[in-house]
Image: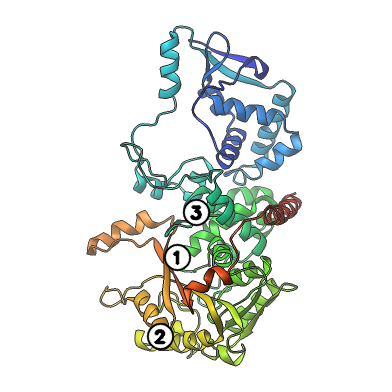
Amino acid sequence: MNTETVHLSQIEVNEANPRKIMNDKFEKLVRSILILPKMLELRPIVVDNTMTVLGGNMRLRALTHISEMTPAEINAELGKCSGYAEKTEAERDILRGYWERWLDSPTAYIIKASELTDAEQREFIIKDNVGYGEWDMDALANEWETAQLVDWGLDLWEDNSEGNGSGSSLPNSAPESSLFDRFIIPPFSILDTRKGYWQDRKKKWYDLIGDMGESRNDTLVTSLEIKYKDLYQRTREHRKELGLSFREYIEKYVPKEDLEREQAKIVAQGVSILDPVMAEIVCRWFSFKGCKSFDCFAGDSVFGFVSAYLGNEFTGIELRAEQAKLNNERVADMTARYICDDGQNVAKHIEPESQDLLFSCPPYFDLEVYSDLPNDASNQDSYEDFIQILKNAFTAAISCLKQDRFAVICVGDVRDKKTGFYYDFCGDIKRIFKEAGVLLYNEIILVEQTASTALRAARYMETRKVAKTHQHILVFFKGNPKNIKNEFPRIEYTEEDMKLFDTAETDTSDNELTSNE
């Protein structure tokens, strides 16, 4: 069988092919083709004698989509591709030139499966879409970056178990279902942040918020060379050729998503940033538009920004002056404010029973120490002193919460660094609220994406510790649960909400394009 080159118009899409692709995966396929067109020659489209596709249906759709783009649109899309920033200007010119020429006469490489019978062709369609074997997750974690693998279309966390197809994992891309339409994420007790639809939404929020945790006192990194150390090393020769400083190189050549990926390496080493999709879910599920929300351990600006963006009023109490100042700058002109004070003093700033939602993700004892302030919960000498500060703050915060309202606390258990045993942090939080007369109503497990888990897991297992990849979202209710239906409107994720988010996304994309240019 010989490879031929034919015009796209000569090839027919096989509408009977059972293999489909969701929007986010389709975008990744388009980008993977744009950044590596040589792959098309190595993997030609297989057609029958009528030029109908037997294998490569999605590649044909992607090529057709590319053929309808302008050179400017292709260049913009290339800028979003993983690995594009690392290419030299000459390599980029070659890529841009290739696609400009291709647009004049869009073609594809094909192989005709003339020797197959009709039955064999049907069998080929299915077998061409079946994957055998499994990935060596340790090798992937050691040799490749997680974000890059995801960009290339690899579902690292998808349930690929064999059997009768009864696996309960959610699809990697959000299907068109009423649960997604109404609740953003299906309201189950396990939320998987590793899924593609969650990660895509998370990126959109971070583009809006711009908070990557860079203001942590103990991990504050002002040097770009340290913050993006791997990128600094990889681009050394290219920067030398261009005669640019590292800052100039970043501003001119590195897409924002690449910087976020580099920043995530620091995050994985201990700087915790609140997940904005989780914040959005909390606001939509356990409060209502126009409500008053507050946090006595505010930390970064994520929850305040998300809450205000969704039309709520937010008040955060933050101990560290520089963090409170930065947060207020980020939410300027929004219905959110941050007060610099000890979270134990929350009742001094907020009226009794005036708030509609208490949310907090408090420090995880000494897992991440935020400051050297003596009243910082994360800086206490003992776990008992740490818990007492949380008890004082949450008890005071509960007095600020109205009747028949929710309190949502995001926590994860931590180990005693000396003994290795867990403290039962989650249990202590439940006891604090129970003693205040506020009972546990829901417990949600938040499964997290951790690029370095495979590396840590092997080391942890030397002492038989398993690597923890989840947090607990504890949902408490103050009042009588029978009143919930009357107090809280039916949840609907309206078309107006979608347009609001899409508008913001479009504006952000335009700004990013301008800055990249």
Please report the residue visible at 71 percent of the width from the left and 51 percent of the height from the top. 509
Q: Measure the alpha-carbon separation of dots 1 and 3.
A: 30 Å
Q: Secondary structure at mark 1?
A: loop
Q: Which residue is mark 2?
A: 386
Residue 311 in sight from this viewpoint:
yes
Q: Of the residues shown, which amino acid type is indicated by label 2?
A: Phe
Mark 2: which secondary structure?
helix
Q: Which residue position is annotated with label 1?
A: 269
- x and y percentages locating residue 496 in the rendered image: 71, 55
Pinpoint residue 398: horizontal percent, then vertical percent.
51, 84
Q: CA distance from mark 3 to mark 2?
A: 35 Å
Q: Amino acid at mark 1?
A: Gln
* Crowd rating for badge 2 (residues with CA inside 10 Å; few <14, some 14–19, many 20+): many
Where is residue 240 shown, x and y percent of the image? 63, 51
Q: Which mark is residue 79?
A: none
Structural distance between the alpha carbons of marks 1 and 2: 22 Å
Q: Neighbour class for label 3 at 10 Å: few (<14), some, many (≥20)?
A: some
In this rendering, which labeled residue sits more in front, label 3 or label 2? 3
Per the image, the residue denoted by label 3 is: 186
Q: Are marks 1 and 2 in contact (CB under 8 Å)?
A: no
Tell me if residue 393 comes above or below residue 281 in the rendering: below
Q: Residue at x 59, y 70 (%)?
A: 303
Q: Which is nearer the eye, 307 or 47?
A: 307
Horizontally, is 253 left or right of 347 in the view?
right
Q: Residue 276, located in which quarter of the rendered image?
A: bottom right
Residue at the outermost left position: 463
Looking at the image, is 196 positioned above or below residue 28? below
Type of the residue with mark 3: Pro
